[in-house]
Structure formats: C-alpha cells, structure tokens
Amino acid sequence: MKLDSISDIFIWIITPLAVIILVVFAFKTIIESSMWFSNNYKYFVKKKGKVIGKREEFISNSNETFLEIDQNNYYVKFQLDDRSEVEMKVTRSKYDKLNINDEGYLTYKGNILMNFDKEEKI
C-alpha cells in the first residue's frame, strides 16, 4: 500500500491509533466506574489488623502511544484478626506512613482504606 497524500496517512495510521486510544480510555473508565459504584454501596468496616505486605506497581505506556502517561499504584496487604487477608490500593502518603508489622485498627469501605490507626507499642 502506497501512501500518497496526507489524507491517506491520516486514514490509515492516525485514525486507527485514535480509535485504539479511545477504546482503552473507555474500557478503563468503565472498570473504574464499576469499582467506584461497588465501593460506594458498601458499609464502613473497622477491624483490627496488621500490615503484612506492601507493593508498588509502576505503569508506563510512553512507548505505546504519543501520550506519555506514567502512573504509580501503591498497595498494602493486611492480615485481619480472623486471619483473613485483604489488599488495598492506597495513596502514596498512606503507603509511606505504613510499615510492615504495624498493628492497629483499619477502617475501610469495599477495597478503599479510609484510615489506619496504629497501636502504640509499649
């Protein structure tokens, strides 16, 4: 296929890229909206727990599109009193304040950590 004009370039290269970007954006928006609605209808829960893990996820798509979007996601894993484990996405500031083996009371709604009150060790 020979691209003879600007309109050919636009039709065969730019348009498919724009469609891909829009589909990815729409998919991400739908997923995040469903997560928000799911969490919005849950009750606040306060339980005693312990920080047992932390992880950081770096997402970069700067090589895939002309838009450079880099993002860090932060997760903290808790073990609750009933020995169940929950992992929650947290902000960078909450991630930095929490350390492995911290114990206290966590307040959460769905999979959103609202607060963690550390117990002071004597």
Image (cartoon, rainbow, N blue to C red):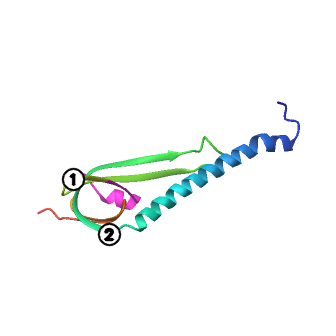
Q: Amino acid at mark 2?
A: Phe
Percent across and percent down for residue 1 are 82, 30
> Mark 1 touching mark 2, by CB under 8 A?
no
| Quadrant into which the C terminus falls | bottom left
Circle nearer the N terminus (1, 2): 2
Pick out the residue farthest to the top: 1
- What residue is pinned by disc 2? 44
Task: Please tell me which residue lies in front, 96 or 44.
Answer: 44
Q: Position of residue 114 (x, y in %)?
A: 35, 66
| Residue 94 covered by magenta stretch | yes
Q: Position of residue 90 (x, y in %)?
A: 38, 58
Q: For the point 36% across and 62% down, which residue is it?
A: 110
Q: Magenta residues?
A: 87-101
Element under label 1?
loop
Mark 1 lies on residue: 101
Secondary structure, mark 2, is strand
Say which residue appears at 56% left-offset and 57% top-offset.
29
50 with respect to 87 (left or right)? left
Residue at the far left: name it.
122
